[in-house]
Image (cartoon, rainbow, N blue to C red):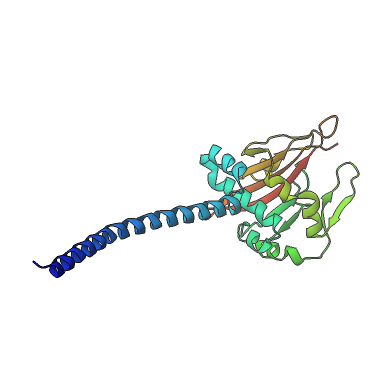
Amino acid sequence: MNSANITCLFLFVTLKAVLGIKRAVIPIVMILCGICAGVLLTSVIYALTGFVFFGGAQRQTVVAENPENAEMTMLAYTVLDYIRDDDFNSLSRVVHPVFGVVFSPYATINLSTNQRFSAEEVASLSTDSHIYMWGVYNGSGEPITLTPQEYFMEFIPAADYINAPVVGINRIVRTGNALENMLDVFPNMKFVEFHIPGGESVDELDWSSLRLGFEEYEGHLRLIAIIYNTWTV
């Protein structure tokens, strides 16, 4: 075999070896790329769901501690998200389609004086400038006459309750001296209470809670009550 043939054979063997290595490496590279892409996608999904649906560690912890009521707990946080974002169109989709939703500015529910809106009416609350009477102020007895937006700002500051440090699932966290009659009015209601403890006042009576009440309708939980609660005289 002459030198030319030897050179050609060497080049052929070298090229074949290189190509063989490439054939072996390419699948490995593709697998590694796939794993990296999967991890990245999972991280993105986790970040998005953690912020949009769970709202961070606080709500994930609450949900995890209440597995038997996870669906209701997640729905309650979602309701707060809708209210915070003024997304009443989305909120209307979780309102009870027959009863609607009642708004109570205190623990005692009065279906005669508290405002109740249908799902269709809830969808337009963000643009509703009508002044409604929602009940009477504790202490003064003066009528609570506010537009929907004013009422939500005063009685349902959702952004505060999203990060409430205490959350009760079908459990009243704290009550004042007002009549607790929600389960008398809605005996089949399940609820989530978001509670902000007092502490800024000497007697610690500056606490407040927001309760979201749900009832099942055709196999799904639907919002029927939004109840604000605080110390009353």
- Return the residue found at the far bottom: 4
Q: Quadrant of residue 86?
A: bottom right
Camera-nearest residue between 40 and 8: 8
Looking at the picture, tell me which residue is in the foreground, 143 or 230.
Answer: 230
Q: Nearer the viewer, residue 229 or 61?
A: 61
**Residue positioned 60% across, 51% down in the render:** 51
Residue 90, placed above or below residue 68: below
Residue 188 appears in view: no
Say if 85 sits above or below 175 in the image. below
- The quadrant where residue 208 appears: top right
Left or right side of 167 for 107: right
Percent x, y of residue 140: 91, 44
Marker count (numbered)? 0
Give the residue furthest to the front.
3
Outermost residue to the top: 203
- Residue at x 78%, y 47% (from the top left corner): 105
Toward the left, the furthest residue is 1
Q: Is residue 219 left or right of residue 139?
A: left
Q: Quadrant of the C terminus?
A: top right
The percent coordinates of residue 40 (x first, y second) are 48, 55
Pick the quarter of the image with the N terminus. bottom left
Q: Is residue 4 left or right of residue 192?
A: left
Q: Is residue 146 visible?
A: yes
Left or right? Give the position of 209 relative to 19.
Answer: right
Image coordinates of residue 46 in percent, x first then y, are: 52, 51
Tell me where residue 156 appears, x and y as whole percent. Answer: 75, 50
